[in-house]
Image (tube, helix red, strand yellow):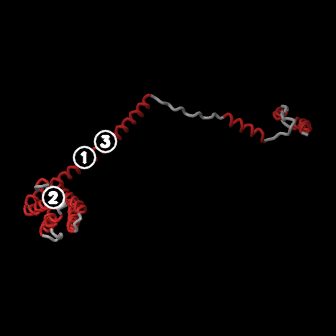
Amino acid sequence: MATTFLSTAKPFLSSSTPSSLSSLTNRPLQFSCPQQKCNPRRPLTSCKALSDESLPVPAASPIIITRRSLSICFLTSFVFSLASRGSSSANAAILEADDDEELLEKVKRDRKKRLERQGVISSANKEKGYLQDLVYKLSKVGQAIDNNDLSTASSVLGGSTDIDWVKKANIAFTKLSSSPEEKIEVDTFNSSLSSLISSVTSNDIESSKTAFVSSATAFEKWTNLTGLFGQLKGL
C-alpha cells in the first residue's frame, strides 16, 4: 500500500509544487523495515541495554598503605600501650600506698593498745597478787591430784567457786581482760574450775585430772594474751 501511495503522489507533487519542493520530493524515500513487523519499542530496549552495558563500572578504590601510615599506626599503638601500662602501674602504686597506710595505722593502733595495757598491768599490783595466789593454789592442787591425794586437793580448792580466792581472781580477770579472746579464756577457766571442784568432791580421780588440765591450760592462755605470763611466778 505504501508503494502505491508513493507512486501516485509523485506526479502530483511534480506538477503542483515549485522546483525546490520538487527536488526534495525527487529524492527517493528509503524505508528499511525487516520482513517481520516493526516493533517501535525494540530499538529503545536495545538502546537501553546498550546504554547500560556501555556505562563503565566504577572500580573499587585501592587501599594504599604507605610507610608513613604504618609508622603512625605503630606509634599510636605504642602510645596507647604505654598509657595503659602507666595507668595500671599508677593504680597499683595507689593501692600499694593505701595498703601501706592501712598497715601503718594498724601498727600504730596496736602499739597504742600495748602501751595502754602495759600501763594497766604495771599499776595493777593488787590484781597481780590475786593472780599469784591463784597460781600457788593451782600448783598445790596439781601436785595433790598427781599423788592421788584428793583430800588435800579438796582442802585447797574449797567446796565451791564462791570462795574468797576465786572471787579475787575474777576481780583481776575483769580488770585485766580487754579482748574477746581473753574473756573467752576466763569463761573457760571458771567452767573448768567448777568441774574440778565437783570432781574432787566426788572423789573422781580421772575427771579431776581432766578438769585440772583444762583449768590450767585456759589460765596459761589468758596470761599469754594479756602479757602477764612472764610476770607471774610458777607458770
Report crowding for label 1: few under 14, some 14 to 19, many 20 or more residues within 10 A (C-alpha).
few
As drawn, the label of residue 97 is 1
**Alpha carbons under labels 2 and 1: distance apart:** 56 Å
Report crowding for label 2: few under 14, some 14 to 19, many 20 or more residues within 10 A (C-alpha).
some
Res 189 → quadrant? bottom left
Q: Quadrant of the N terminus?
A: top right
- Tell which tag, 2 or 1, sits nearer the viewer: 2
Residue at image location 20% in from the left, 56% down from the top:
221
**Alpha carbons under labels 1 and 3: distance apart:** 12 Å
Residue at image location 78% in from the left, 39% down from the top:
42
Name the foreground residue: 196 vs 55: 196
Label 3: which secondary element: helix
Label 1: which secondary element: helix
Three-letter amino acid code at the position of disc 1: Ala
Residue hosting label 2: 143
Count of all numbered marks drawn on residues in the image: 3
Please report whichever mark, 1 or 3, sits nearer to the chain's N-terminal start. 3
Look at the numbered discs 2 and 1 and tell me whether their residues touch, using CB distance below 8 Å: no
Please report whichever mark, 2 or 1, sits nearer to the chain's N-terminal start. 1
Please report whichever mark, 3 or 2, sits nearer to the chain's N-terminal start. 3
Res. 159 in view: yes
Res 185 → quadrant? bottom left
Label 2: which secondary element: helix
